[in-house]
Image (spheres, helix red, strand yellow):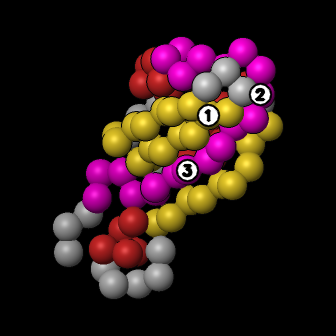
Amino acid sequence: MEQLEFKFDTQLLIDGEDLDEDEIHDYITEHFKGDCLLVVGDDTLIKIHFHTNEPWQILEYGQSIGDIYDVVVENMQRQEEGLKG
């Protein structure tokens, strides 16, 4: 079976103040390896969706700029192989 380049689908919400989705998008792009990045929201709530092999780095970054919650990390490689992700 084909191995995925980035196996963890990482999703979270960030509650904070003066959040800027463009700045967050650019920071993630510049500092973390992954693909399928989505950063949407406003200055107090941001949703992140990102495929990576180091989901903990995205969680640490999110927590550094606000309060994270509704965290989901799914192993897409396991899902690809018919297992629970």
The image's mark for residue 56 is: none
Height in image: 14 above or below 19? below
Which residues make up the magenta segment?
Answer: 4-23
Q: Do the residues labelled 1 and 2 touch (CB within 8 Å)?
A: yes
The image's mark for residue 16 is: 2
Query: Do we see residue 58 in this rendering?
Result: yes
Q: Label 1 vs label 2: CA separation?
A: 8 Å
Height in image: 83 above or below 34? below
Residue at the spot 20% in from the left edge and 67% down from the top edge? 2
Residue ID for mark 1: 46
Query: Do we see residue 54 in this rendering?
Result: no
Question: Quick one: 8 or 17, which is closer to the camera?
Answer: 17
- The question of residue 35 being in magenta is answered with no
Height in image: 20 above or below 69? above
The image's mark for residue 11 is: 3
Where's residue 42, x and y in %?
A: 61, 25
Q: Label 3 vs label 1: CA separation?
A: 11 Å
Q: How crowded is mark 2: few (under 14 residues within 10 Å), some or many (20 or more)?
A: some
State which tag comes first along the sequence, 3 or 1. 3
State which tag comes first along the sequence, 3 or 2. 3
Where's residue 32, x and y in %?
A: 47, 31
Q: Are marks 3 and 1 in contact (CB under 8 Å)?
A: no
Question: Quick one: 31 or 39, which is closer to the camera?
Answer: 39
Height in image: 32 above or below 1? above
